Amino acid sequence: MTSRTVRARTTGGASEDVEAREFEDWQRQVRARTSAHLRDFLDRRYREHLDDETRVIAKVLGTATSGGKQVRSLFVLVGWLCGAEENPAAVRAAASAELLHCFALVQDDVMDESALRRGAPSAHSMFAQWHQAEGLPGSAQRFGESAAVLAGDLCLVWAGQMLRESGLPAEAVARAAPRYDWMRAELAVGQFRDLLNVVEQETSVERVLSIARAKSGHYTVRRPLELGADLAGCPAEVLGALGAYGDAVGEAFQLRDDVLGVFGDPGVTGKPVGDDLRAGKAVTVVAVAEELATGAQRARLRDLRRAGGQDRLDDDAVLRWLAIIEETGARERVEQLIDQRLQRGLTALAAAPIPVRARAHLTALARVCCDRTR
């Protein structure tokens, strides 16, 4: 997001312009440092655990951990800034969140049968391609999925190790450990609930939002923020405000993700138009469309959703589905929900004793989550 975008959605003038530039500079610097820490950590793990036979894991994870906006690591670090000054150990701890995210993405792509991630082959696709190139026996697809699950498990283990070895005081890591465990368990249960939300079932906007909060919203915003703040020893008042902010902004993040999964530009998202529709996902846009639809529209939407779940959607069917969603006004309604949650999140910070710099970064990050382009 450009500083012009930030400035357009704030009131003020020169001060917001300066804050936007400062945030963008800080964001670039943090991303560069977290990427460097992540590469260094992974290189050491590769040397310890991989040999010539298993070296393909390093190649796949090198692709899986590159790119992206590093939103979760930014939130961990901003949470830390609510109670302490930035330092290299805190940046390393924040970088560990990218390994946890890689674990989630790799396994999510297996469950969704997604061939692409950020415009490149997904992990299971890369493993399947390697299997074929090596002329190995058996199903390349099955090998790719199994190998990706194991690679994701490595990321999960290494994320915890990177946090412990970040250089933060042992008592700080121990203090935050229950919150870290909760975040990981919540993510897994949220993914399971997503699997249960099969296309044949009737769904509702509240059910979809509830799944979104557990699967993505909490683990993207609220839990990383709380983790960073807990590591820094922030008081309960600050943790409470960050939790309320994280709930609202995390939900907005997932709502934006749902819009992009349905209407996103393939050149920006790295995935086909209507990718979530093809997968038969009951995402928020779909649920809102069915609530707003006329009787005839609702019947057509449900027929298309069932076809998506059974892999019977061609490009024309996807375009018809998109057209009906637009006709219902669902896209505009979800945009309203995003704006409402943005304002709710920012309001939650108003009375909390949060340092000025951390507050400015939280405001900018909220807008990144709501306005992101991928």
Image: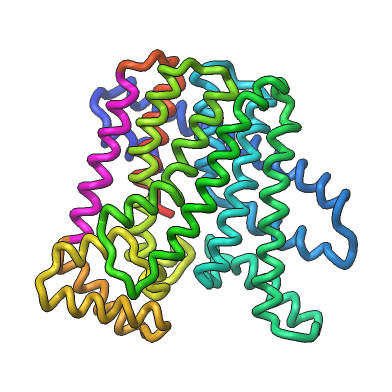
* Quadrant in the picture for residue 121: bottom right
Residue pictured at 64% horizontal, 69% vertical:
124
Magenta stretch encompasses residue 348: yes
Q: How many badges with numbers are in the image? A: 0
Residue 277 lies in the magenta-colored region: no
Q: Residue 14 in the image: state x and y as whole percent.
A: 31, 22
Q: Quadrant of the C terminus?
A: bottom left
- Residue 29 appears in the picture as rendered: no
Highlighted magenta segment, given as a residue range: 330-350
Seen in the picture, residue 240 relative to 297 is either above or below; the reply is above
Asked if 318 appears above or below 184 in the picture, the reply is below
Residue drawn at 31 percent across, 26 percent down: 348
- Could you tell me which residue is drawn at 34 percent across and 52 percent down? 256
Q: Nearer the viewer, residue 46 or 296?
A: 296
On the image, the x and y values in percent for residue 283 come to 34, 62
Task: Tell whether 275 sits left or right of 182.
Answer: left
The N terminus sits in image quarter: top left
